[in-house]
Amino acid sequence: EVQLQASGGGLVQTGGSLRLSCAASGFPFDERAIAWFRQAPGKEREGISCIDDNGETPYYADSVKGRFSISADNAKNTVILQMDNLSPEDTGVYYCAVGMTCTWYVGGRYRFDPRALAYDYWGQGTQVTVSS
């Protein structure tokens, strides 16, 4: 059974940092991509970052590029999302998800795939709240 357990959310002030963890089990960790999504109240779920099955190739949405960093610990079957310089716009429920790959072919090249439908299994989410 595939299981994804997201943790590390909380309340932080603008400019602060949080470190999210996604503990995975039930599938070959080094053969799947792991992505992070977030969903703010009243908004659609947004793909923000992904790390590919090799654990070495990260992808980021423009909204978090330069502030968030994703990494994988294959020995612990865990993916970390380090979030720095947070702003109120980063508030939402953060989910991790597993898929075959982080990318899709669009616009003549492979790009980060931020579509929820591209990922097969989801964790339960962890709340991140950034106060102004």
Image: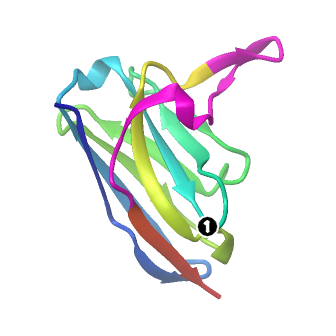
| Residue 8, image quadrant | bottom left
Helix, strand or loop under label 1: helix
Q: Nearer the viewer, residue 57 or 11?
A: 11
Q: Residue at x 45, y 82 (%)?
A: 11
Residue 115 lies within the magenta run: yes
Q: What quarter of the picture does the N terminus occupy?
A: top left
Q: Residue at x 22, y 36 (%)?
A: 77
Horizontally, is 50 left or right of 31 in the view?
A: right
Q: Position of residue 82 (x, y in %)?
A: 46, 57
Q: Position of residue 123 (x, y in %)?
A: 33, 47
Q: Is residue 51 left or right of residue 108?
A: left
Identify the magenta region.
104-125
According to the picture, the residue beneath numbered tag 1 turns out to be 90
Specify the amino acid type for callout 1. Asp
Q: Is residue 25 left or right of residue 6?
A: left
Q: Is residue 34 above or below residue 105?
A: below
